Image (spheres, rainbow, N blue to C red):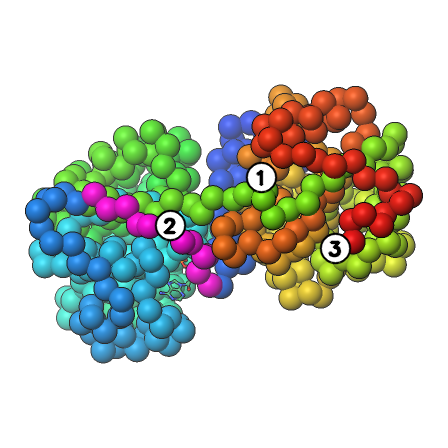
Amino acid sequence: DSSSAAAKSEADGDNKTTDDDDKEDKAAQSLLNKLIRNNLVNNTNQVEVLQKDPNSPLYSVKSFEELRLKPQLLQGVYGMGFNRPSKIQETALPMMLAEPPQNLIAQSQSGTGKTAAFVLAMLSHVDPNNKYPQCLCVSPTYELALQTGKVIEQMGKHYPEVRLVYAIRGNKLQRGMKLQEQIVIGTPGTMLDWCAKFKFIDPKKIKVFVLDEADVMIATQGHQDQSIRIQRMLPKNCQMLLFSATFEETVWNFAQRIVPDPNIIKLKREEETLDTIKQYYVLCNSREEKFQALCNIYGAITIAQAMIFCHTRKTAGWLAGELSREGHQVALLSGEMQVEQRAAVIDRFRDGKEKVLVTTNVCARGIDVEQVSVVINFDLPVDKDGNPDNETYLHRIGRTGRFGKRGLAINMVDSRMSMNILNKIQEHFSKKIEKLDTDDLDEIE
Ligand code: ADP
């Protein structure tokens, strides 16, 4: 509805987010990550494993052959361009494919191969000769369910006997009918209705239950209860699998209610550091002076690609306009854009079609554009109370371990307040941020 959209747009612009926005934001962020990611993230950390039975041997595989997959599935995996299992897949896949199947809780950041792993497990466990649902997979939103559905279709390309149906609002079925598809993927509310109210699915025949994006899931009122109610209808020997990108206490409590006797796998996020980054600040008196300083920097040094962060949509829009008037190829990423549009903008920037990406803080949270060498904070990152947002600062500017290239970060300061924030950020990381004189720029080259 347009009035709430307007309210949201204002909130976004002012960086005041309500809980509702947060939920929407989490799901949108997750979708954005899926849309822009076409390979695995690099991660040099060790996988931590906690086995249900610590005495049982721990298998891990280095190749897909070792998993003895059905030939059609192996073909599907290679057809997707996968050569070997990802780090999390090395241990997760043997557990999920073991006989008898084991329950699993797995946590690792987005882009580490969780979806591909559970899709392979579902496809391995179904019997295509049985024309009834055998695997249920619940996702927090319709769009996320569709993304997982696409992976099932790709991986199952050579296994067409296995069929898939979406349990999402709007997909209305005739009363009294029984589903014949082996895999059902959808949102918790509709899935529960299809099991309990309409009985399109016989939950007693389910062999694998997957709950994806648990952290996004629990942010939505009702999803937790619905998921638990579905889980309670499933047989004792049904395999339960739960995945999450992050693992706060609340997610953990929920996970334990969904997955009895779990094996647990965790892969920590690669830590980011500021060690390979040169950090500067520029002192200005107004927005216009900040823009002028930016132009001076551009005139003095060659910048392959830069990302520029602004606090509000309004500033971002204004700055993008000014920069293109100066002849720069600018892309603008803004909160009112659909997730798909945002993904398209990021893709173009990734491909080098635009050299400058101007974005708001809220919009760019959580996205990684690894090759960008220059990051400019046109406004410093602050949280909703106006305090320095150290985490965002680090994620925006920092690089991860051995993949880290050298980088340059420039912070624009235009008031006593922003100087204060800069000082706090400097203190927090105990790393000096040097003053830069934009009339004399020899030093940064
Ligand atoms: P997650 O669910 O953890 O976000 P995905 O399963 O979506 O991760 O994988 C992230 C990206 O990496 C996807 O583009 C996927 O196709 C790709 N991918 C997954 N597993 C492998 C693999 N073993 N080898 C190469 N690419 C992979």
Q: Which of 353 and 203 is in front in this view?
A: 353
Q: Write down the region rendered in magenta.
A: 39-50
Residue 355, placed above or below residue 384: below
Return the residue found at the far front.
443
Lower position in the chain sequence, tag 2 or tag 1: 2
- Disc tally is 3
Element on which disc 2 rests: loop
Residue 410 x/y as whole percent:
74, 42
- Determine if the magenta segment contains residue 41: yes
Residue under numbered circle 1: 394
Q: Nearer the viewer, residue 230 or 394?
A: 394
Mark on residue 356?
Answer: 3
Residue 394 x/y as whole percent:
58, 39
Going 17% across and 45% down the picture, which residue do you hit? 51
Which kind of residue does numbered mark 1 sit on?
Answer: Leu
Element on which disc 1 rests: helix
Which kind of residue does numbered mark 3 sit on?
Answer: Val
Q: Do the residues labelled 3 and 1 touch (CB within 8 Å)?
A: no
Going 59% across and 28% down the picture, which residue do you hit? 428
Ligand 1 quarter of the rendering? bottom left
Residue 224 x/y as whole percent:
32, 34
Residue under numbered circle 2: 45
- Packing grade of label 1 (10 A; few <14, some 14-19, many >=20) is some
Lower position in the chain sequence, tag 3 or tag 2: 2
Secondary structure that dominates the magenta span: loop
Element on which disc 3 rests: strand
